[in-house]
Image (cartoon, rainbow, N blue to C red):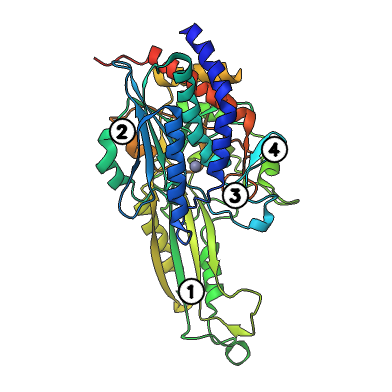
Amino acid sequence: MRDALSSVRASVDASVPGFRRRLEELIRIPSVSAPGFDPAHVRRSADCTAAILDQAGLENVRLLEIDGAHPYVAGEWLHAAAAPTVLFYAHHDVQPPGRVDRWSSDPFEPVERGGRLYGRGSADDKAGAVMHAVAVRGWLDATGTLPCNVKVLIEGEEEIGSGHLHAFLERYGRQLRADVMVLADAGNFAVGLPALTYALRGVTEITVHVRALRAPQHSGVFGGILPDPVQALAKMLATLTDDAGNIAVPTLTDDVRALTAAERERLDRLPFDDAAWAQVAGLLDGVRLLRDPGQSPWERVWMRPTIAVIGLDAHPIQGSSNQILAEAAARVSLRLAPGQDPLRCQRVLADHLRRIAPWGVQVEIELGREAAPAWICEPTGPAFEAAEAALAEAFGYPPVYMGVGGSIPFVGPFASAFGGVPALLTGPADPSSRIHSEDESLHLEDWRRHCHAEAILLAELAARLPARP
Ligand SMILES: [Zn+2]
């Protein structure tokens, strides 16, 4: 296997430049899955992804469709007889570009600067999709075979919460069954320092509308006697957290599961650098991180729930006049900790907002469709040992075991549908990648190392996982 591996690694290096061009092609397609953006682009990126999987040498490359969902792309190579089957996952849809004028270059025209490739989806997650192709191509070029059976699934609706996941799993789950999943949608702990992600927070949201008047009214004639719905909403939102930034909604955190001793020990081992976080996050002078002396900051961002107001409607300042507005609205997003039930949390939050609304204003609440619980696993056993060995060999450092405060709804339902198989979350993003933000970028050398790690991982999994009867 050693000899094979060195020629596989040479083939990986040889195919990286060509696949980088395919990655750039993929970034040029604005495959934003969010409502209001042209779904034809997501279909084009599915087609382009399929062509890349074909080029990798995968067989039976196909689009998997569910009514009303953006297409998933799948491919496979199943000639490794009794060897284990690996499911490689990534997604080809992307976040909206946001404020395009804040980007240093066109979000959908990939540009290399300082060893990084800039463009929407470069790190999240088109590089993940393409690295699966590089690893497979590397093996097939060097040896004509793969050490494991490989299935690849590239999702098209991850960035909008994988709303059709259950229907998808019902329809296609059997075709995708595997002994281990490898998800290239997480990232490195730092540039050059790989990671395995064993915990993801869940996510859900609600939208609250506050209405007080049939129409806006003159603020001079009526001010002082009419309630202002914008201030009513502001008062309501102000009750969501306390001065330390902790959730203050009664009972909302009651179902957070306590950390195990192993989980706490793993968190306590990790260094946390306030200045580096402030820098990466773009925190302005004088603005403080929300720390709690009783909690590891990693626990706060990975294992505790949090609330963000992600949208606010009143009247734009431009064009405003002296009137009391008739209504206001906010969208409130909740990141959920292990143990929390998203639907219960939506209900608790909605009931709280209704209860504390001042002045008898009318409150209408829409429960968001996105409702994914957190996912956490105990990262031990042969699959994790295989990943640890592969990443250590490719990067020269063993991986850091980390959580991610974000969510990948796919992981939990698929792992349990396949009988609780291990899920290995890696990926080429790093804390400077600014995924979901302006100037998203991919560290190209780390991406190359991940392509190697994944090729090595196939050999390690074949060697360490039990062969099937
Ligand atoms: Zn992603």
Q: Helix, strand or loop at disc 1?
A: helix
Q: Which residue is mark 3?
A: 108
Bin the neighbour count of mark 2 within 10 Å (Cα to Cα): few under 14, some 14-19, many 20 and up. many
Q: Which residue is mark 2?
A: 176
State which tag comes first along the sequence, 1 or 2: 2
Bin the neighbour count of mark 3 within 10 Å (Cα to Cα): few under 14, some 14-19, many 20 and up. many
Q: Helix, strand or loop at disc 3?
A: loop
Amino acid at dot 3: Phe
Q: Which residue occupies the extreme right position in the image?
A: 285
Q: CA distance from mark 1 to mark 3?
A: 46 Å
Residue 358 bears which disc, if any? 1
Residue 211 on image: x %, y %: 46, 77
Which quadrant holds residue 171? top left
Is residue 300 something one can see in this rendering? no
Q: Nearer the viewer, mark 3 or mark 2?
A: 3
Q: Is residue 398 left or right of residue 162?
A: right
Which quadrant holds residue 365? bottom left
Q: Nearer the viewer, mark 1 or mark 2?
A: 2
Amino acid at dot 2: Leu
Q: Residue 77 versus residue 312: which sits nearer the camera?
A: 77
Q: Helix, strand or loop at disc 2?
A: helix
Residue at 55% in and 38% down: 23
Amino acid at dot 4: Ala
Residue at 65% in and 74% down: 317
Q: Which residue is mark 4?
A: 276
Q: Residue 275 versus residue 49: which sits nearer the camera?
A: 49
